Image (cartoon, grey):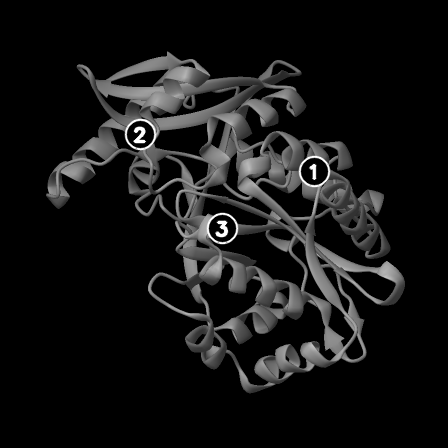
Amino acid sequence: MEIQRLSLDEWADVLPDSGTGPFHQPEMLALIDEYEDGELQLLGGFRGQEPVGLLPVFVRRLFGLKFVISPPPDLAVPWLGPVLLPASPKQRKREKRNEQFTEAALDAVGAGEPRTLFGIVGSPEYADPRPYLWNGQNVAPRFNHVLELAERDTESVLKSFTRDLRKEIRKGNDIDVSITTEGAAAAERICGELKERHAAQGLAYPTPRSFARAVATRFEDNTRVYVARGPGGAFLGGITLLYANGDAIFWQGGTKASYEGVSVNSLLHWEILTDILEDPALERVERYHLGNALNRRISRYKSKFNGEPVVNYEIKSDLMVLARKAHAARTELSGKRLADVRDWALPP
């Protein structure tokens, strides 16, 4: 197994057309790199000329320590991590390649070195993190609500919702709320609303407003910004949606709001789902990621949409675990707790 450092163009040539969502796309990685202090390293694992796996990491050096992270923690990117390329249908061969690529990638970034802190959050498509366990890393599950939408229509999806959610969506037709797609300025405002909502809860939401605007501008072909407005065009709420290669992701938005007793979030999600199911421009989308299914309070709301809790994995070295605990304790004492990425999509 040979690990090569790839350019963005080389990454684009190797990246598969399925099994990867928006965050692994080269345009998104280039944008993240502009906002991240660390160095972007695009690692490709090859057996001869055949690509086996990919891993994007950002390398920071601070106080004599090396941080190898994927994704960076401050840009509201919920996951990144490894991508295994299509291989033999035989389970044994797939496991062997996963193990070989993992060992080679860890060695390439120096994850076993005494002053290296290693931490990644893999996508839901990366389903077998055992090689990281076998190489001394800590693995913990995360959960996300996912609605499978392939071969479905709006009627069948709506019928699968809870009774109170169906009633709420139908009531939305009778109130003065319009939902449209807008542009980069709306994405920036949605990010600002999140920052204000978290600040009111004593939390820090570090993602810059300018990053949300840049995503909607530079990643325009894979972004939609849904905005709900009331009488006179009053802003009621919004959601920024990212999509690529079959996956649509509720990225930012969903701050608590209601209008005439109806959840604005429910109406926004239903508009998104309707577009996914009916708009030819989104016909490749097969899944809608509603986000956090680990937080009990948030999960109770999102379960109304009848999505499945799908696991993805957080992988950290022992030193990263200790550093995270120390950081959490320090921020608790300062009274400025950092919002966890799993809590960035808030319920209504």
CB atoms at circles 1 and 2 under 8 Å apart?
no
Identify residue type, mark 2: Thr
* Front label number (1 vs 2): 1
Residue pointed to by mark 2: 102
Determine the residue positioned at 39% across, 23% down. 12
Q: Residue furthest front?
A: 280
Which kind of residue does numbered mark 3 sit on?
Ala
> Mark 3 sits on what residue?
248
For discs 3 and 2, the disc positioned in front in the rendered view: 3
In terms of sequence position, does the residue under pointer 1 or pointer 2 come before the other?
2
Q: Is tag 3's residue or tag 1's residue first in the polypeptide sequence?
A: 1
Nearer-the-camera pick, 6 or 3: 6
Task: Determine whether the residue tagged by mark 2 lies in a helix, strand or loop.
Answer: helix
Residue 341 position, x and y percent, is 62, 47
Q: Is 240 located above or below residue 54 in the figure? A: below
- Please state if 330 lies on the left or on the right of 347 as rendered: right
Q: Amino acid at mark 1?
A: Ala
Residue 9 falls in image quadrant: top left
| Residue 179 percent location from the top left of the image | 70, 61
User: How far apart, in angstroms, are the residues tagged by discs 1 and 2?
Assistant: 32 Å
Q: Quadrant of residue 183?
A: top right
Quote the CA–CA distance across marks 3 and 2: 27 Å
> Which numbered marker is on residue 212?
1
The percent coordinates of residue 255 (x first, y second) are 74, 59
Determine the residue positioned at 43% across, 35% down: 81
